Amino acid sequence: MNKALVLRMGQMHAQRYIPMLLDRIAAGEMDPGYLATHPMPLTQGARGYEIFEKKQDGCLRTVLHPQA
């Protein structure tokens, strides 16, 4: 206690890189579509979460679509 310790943490520098990445996506230089590996209807949300959590079937991202 009182040792002048400084702890700094964070998961990533998103605020620094997101604007540049969005510009590249808008210019067509990048296509992030490959990340959505498991699209499914919103009614299967619980199953989608389970697949993502357990990393089953090579899941990178589950994308839930509302029923039209």
Image (spheres, helix red, strand yellow):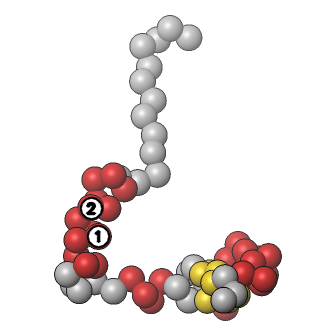
Residue linked to disc 1: 22
Please tell me whether residue 63 is drawn above or below residue 5 in the rendered image. below
Residue linked to disc 2: 19
Q: Tag 2: residue type?
A: Pro
Q: Nearer the viewer, residue 44 or 9?
A: 44
Q: Quadrant of residue 27?
A: bottom left
Please tell me whether residue 61 is drawn above or below residue 7 in the rendered image. below
Q: Residue 36's spot in the image, x, y percent?
A: 52, 85
Q: Quadrant of residue 47?
A: bottom right
Q: Nearer the viewer, residue 15 or 13?
A: 15
Image quarter of the C terminus: bottom right
In the displayed structure image, the side of residue 26 where residue 59 appears, left or right: right
Q: Residue at x 77, y 84 (%)?
A: 44
Q: Residue 26's spot in the image, x, y percent?
A: 25, 78
Q: Residue at x 61, y 89 (%)?
A: 39
> Residue lying furthest front in this view?
68
- Dot 1: element: helix
Q: Residue at x 46, y 11 (%)?
A: 3
In the displayed structure image, the side of residue 46 where residue 2 appears, left or right: left
Q: Residue at x 75, y 78 (%)?
A: 45
Does the image show residue 34?
yes
